[in-house]
Each structure stands twice: as structure tokens, then as C-alpha cells.
Amino acid sequence: MASIVGKKQDGKTYYYLVESARVGGKPRIVSQRYLGSAEEIAARLSEAGPGEPDRTRHLAFGDIAAVWSVLERLGVAEIVDEVVGGRRSDAAASVGTYIALATANRVVDPCSKRRFSDWWKTTAGDRWVRLPASALDHRRFWDAMDAISEEQLREIERRIVTRMVEVFSGGGLDLVQLNAALAAVRHLPRLGGAVGRALCLLARGGCDASTEETIAALEVLRRAPGLRALPGVRASASWL
């Protein structure tokens, strides 16, 4: 229980904020904070008003919090680090952390890597990622990106997409956005072989297909030459 207590010294009363609690069954003062004399307290209250702060900071919170929660849910940084390997001994953060930070910036408020540090200061991002200012130098981002080979990038992409399918569609894929494209191309005889089988899987039972089957089918379609140019596909090509 907290209370304000006055103590007299040399004829003047000085005030303290004290907190009491029972210790060993007996009331004891467990913390004490000096407030000052009545005149000192009155002077402080008159400066900014009772309980008002001397200054405030306004930081972006909602957008960066939402984006970072999705990145954490998908395990983006962890996936990158699993593929690329542990961070260098002289690096303040792992490659995966830098990629996640760059991704968050691209979604929330895109800017150059040189301006990233200035942007980061305007957000509440250090609630989730605490890094020294030197670690946010634009050269550290380029170092992290240079550490990823094309082969590793493809593997990172595969793992993240697999994770997205698992997290957001319970192991299957929502085909709402595919309907127009599938309707336009599933009947075309020239799309045989692997492309035809991929379309068949997605058109007939994509929602019930396993994660690996769905990912493999989408990869086949993504690599199919000329598929984007077919009628009906251009309007819904974001899935390729």
C-alpha cells in the first residue's frame, strides 16, 4: 500500500512516497521515495501540471506491429538463417534478421537502405528488435543480402511459401483467386505434360492437396513458358 508521509527535520516537513507491506506478519516500509518539501512539490506541479510529462515521443506502432507479427508467425528470419547459416561473429544481427527488417520496411513505408535507420527511429520497432545504431547502417543490409546465393534464395522462397500455405490455409490452398485463370486454361490441349497435371491437381482438388503437392504444382505453373500471356491469366497472374 502506497502513501505520502511527512517527516520533520530542523523544523521543516519533508514528504516521502512510501510503500508498506507485511513482512513476517508485521507492517514494514518496503520502499521510500523522497518528494521534497511542500514548496518544492508545489513548484514542480506548477511547471507542467499535475502528472503531465515534460516531453513525449510519438512513434508508429500499429503497422509495424502487424507486419512484424506476421513475419514472426511465418518464421521468416529463422528460415533464412536455417538456409544461410549462423551469423558472423562480427555481425550485430543474423542475415535472417536483416532480411526480415528490410521486408518490414518494404511493407510499411519503403525507403532506401541508407534511410532505413532514420525510418526505424520513427517506429516502435525496438520493442521487438533491439539493435545498436551501427547495426542499421545500410552497408550491413547489403552484406546480408550478398550472403545469400541464388540457390539459397530459391530454397528460402520454397520454405516460406510452404509455411504460408500451412499457416494461412490449414495445409491446403484457397483457390478463389485462381478460378478465372484455371477456367481459361484447364481446357487448352497444348498445356500437357507437367503443366497439365499441375492444373489438374489445382482445379480438381487443390484445397485437399497436401502442402508439398500444392507447392510443387504452383512451381510448375510459375515456370511454364508463356502461361502468363494466355487469356484470362493476365488478370489473375499474381499467384504465378
Image (spheres, helix red, strand yellow):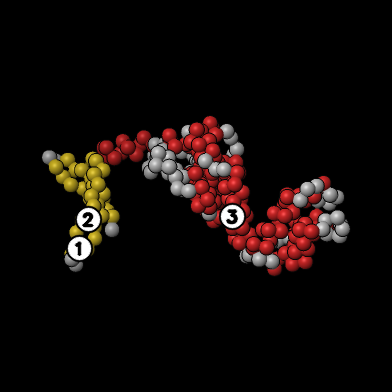
Q: Residue at x 57, y 33 (%)?
A: 112
Outermost residue toward the front?
A: 193
Residue type pointed to by label 1 = Val
Q: Dot 3, crowdedness within 10 Å: few (<14), some or many (≥20)?
A: some
Counting from the top left corner in percent of width and height, residue 59 is at 50, 41
Residue type pointed to by label 3 = Arg
Camera-nearest residue between 80 and 189: 189
Counting from the top left corner in percent of width and height, residue 98 is at 51, 42
Q: Residue at x 61, y 62 (%)?
A: 166
Counting from the top left corner in percent of width and height, residue 235 is at 80, 49
Outermost residue toward the left?
A: 10
- Dot 1 and dot 2 residues touching (CB under 8 Å): yes
Quarter holding the N terminus is: bottom left
The CA distance from mark 1 to mark 2 is 9 Å
- As helix, strand or loop, the secondary structure at mark 2 comes to strand
Find residue 159 and name its label.
3
**What residue would you read off at disc 2?**
30
- As helix, strand or loop, the secondary structure at mark 1 comes to strand
Comes first in the chain, label 1 or label 2: 1
The CA distance from mark 1 to mark 3 is 56 Å
Residue type pointed to by label 2 = Val
Find residue 23 and name its label.
1
Q: Is residue 5 above or below residue 116?
A: below
Comes first in the chain, label 1 or label 3: 1
